[in-house]
Amino acid sequence: MDRVLLVASTFCFLLGFAYTMFAFGAGRYRPSRFNFGVISLGFAFQTAFLFMRGHEIGSCPLTNLFEVFIFLSWSMVLLYLLIGTAYRLSLLGAFTSPLVFIFQTFALIAPIDTPMHARVMHSAWLELHAAISIIAYGAFALAGVAGVMFLVQERQLKTHQLRSFFFHLPPIHDLSVAINRLLLTGFALLTIGLLAGFAVRIDWVKVSWGIGVWLIYGAILQAEKWKRVSPRRVAQLAVAAFTITLSTLWGLNFISAPNHL
Amino acid sequence: MTVLCFGLSHQTADVALRERFAIAEHELGEAAHRLGSFDGIGEAVIVSTCNRVEFYAAADEPERGLAALRQFVSERAAADAGAFSSFYKIDGAQSVRHLFRVVCGLESMVLGETEILGQVKKAYSIAVEHGSTARHLNKLFQRAFNVAKEVRTKTNITRGSVSVGSVAVDLAERIFGRLNTCKVMILGAGETSEQTARALLSRGAKSILVSNRSYDRAAALAAEMGGAAIHFDHWDKNFDEIDILVSSTAAPHAIVTRDKLAPVMQARRDRPLFIIDLAVPRDVEAAANKLEGVYLYDIDSLRTLSEQSLAIRRQDLAICEKMIDRHVAEFSEWLGRLGSEAVEARDLPIGARVSQS
């Protein structure tokens, strides 16, 4: 049953993605209720899936890479629903849908949903650490998405080649503010997540990796605060940092298991 | 009952003739009320803008209605036969289509402009206030506003900007979002730069600095726009505080170079600079656009963008016409149904009419 919910959720994001592609292709993209509706429905299915999975395993559903991908996707959509509408960044959803669709499709197809009953989290601190950290990565993912939007819009402005969606992408100033806030949100959450991780028996590989990610984002935020980098560079760094974080997540899962402190 | 439209526009009459028949906004209500009381006219709405003067009426018989419209116009403006040759007289589905095209901006001087919709809405609400409309024109105008909304939402007919000034403002908003924190500098007080600066101010730009070779001219323009004048020799000293530069000097060579801008942009990495170069020969070196945070548009690129917008609008013309056709057919069907009901009601015996009502 829980997989059916996940397939339904993935289908919703596919619909959102397809609608965006079709509308862009036809040159008449408009932020629509349809897009917002399918994203909200997809989110509802995700939430139901995570609830059922958590109920089934008796802990926060973050016990294997499959669940991590779904929780990460859920975090991204949650943050989009909270932040996207508040900052008039409705198109963020159009850019988020494909990423969530790819994450969830990968999670459904790849053989990563292996039962890990031995590692089920029984500590509340560990659950807090894992959940907060993944939500932080969701914020970083969304910052990366906003970064892509910034770079697309900035390129159009620089080259004077304005496509039909130019008028629907937010101003680069607004995108820059959103990236900064998402990075700050992610950084604050990751800090809390890491602190919660220190309170329990920890896996030193995961913690080192977490500290590495924390340092990368901390450096970006500091450079931005001291005005050492331009908004365009911050957008590029947000995309690059999330790409690095995501690409190392897979390998981390394999090498971290035998390294509990 | 049929719908009539009698009027003239920029397509059929020059400005002198349009002025002669124009009706001031404060007179519209009374005029519509009076027109509605003419024999042969059931309901009336008058639309009077700088580009068109149109009289819409609901009449039982087209010929009588048109004659009444002609008489009304004649009385108001002492029109002769020559003046009437510039008027169009349309009825039935054609007049419905005409109104729908007008509110969608398809009959406007600038294709897809949206100001006309507000003007027609105003004219209609004045007519409603003065009691010169009833079932037919109410339904017609409500439907026209729906058509305009649908066309605006589902097509690109209002997309982009089609004048240099409005393109510049659109670009500024895509860079800075709201302009209420933006400082603008005009370098060289030409007509286009002044219009562009005014457009930026009208969209909320925070303040304006004016620099011109003639300081007196700069001071006068600054006073007019509520800004400050600066001496032409010192304009670059204020560079750090501005967000938008509108340049149109008569300098024979570039006065803003990449080398001059580079240190300024280094110091303001987090703040973009939008440069609108309206001068020919250009005031700003093209290479300046390569600097991080600089968005440089010259007069040619602005014109190209406005032409692109117009081309996009033209592409969607056929889609708009299809939408309008559908609404005209639906409205005509409704009007026909209403007519049949009226005939049936009239043909019924008196007792049956009372029981039906």
Image: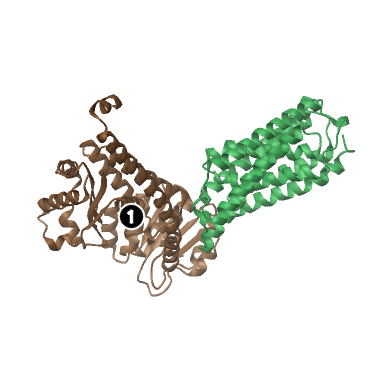
Image position, residue A111 (x, y; %)? 84, 43
| Left or right, A30 with reference to A207 | left
Query: Considering depth in this image, is B60 or A199 the residue closer to the camera?
Result: B60
| Left or right, B73 with reference to B284 | left
Query: Considering depth in this image, is A191 or B321 the residue closer to the camera?
Result: B321
Rendered-image quadrant of the N terminus of chain A = top right
- Would you name the residue on which mark 1 appears? B198
Rendered-image quadrant of the C terminus of chain A = top right
Picture colour scheme? by chain
Vertical placement of residue B313 versus B150, above or below: below
Please give the count of numbered marks on the rendered protein.
1
Q: Secondary structure at mark 1?
A: helix
Image position, residue B354 (x, y; %)? 26, 25
Image position, residue A207 (x, y; %)? 79, 38
| Left or right, A53 with reference to A25 | right
Image position, residue B204 (x, y; %)? 38, 47
Label 1 amino acid?
Arg
Note the chain letter of the green one: A
Vertical placement of residue A244 versus A87, above or below: below
Q: Residue at x 35, y 71 (%)?
A: B250
Q: Residues within 10 Å of mark 1 (few under 14, many from 20)?
A: some
Query: Considering depth in this image, is B23 or A211 the residue closer to the camera?
Result: B23
Q: Chain of mark 1?
A: B
Note the chain letter of the brown one: B
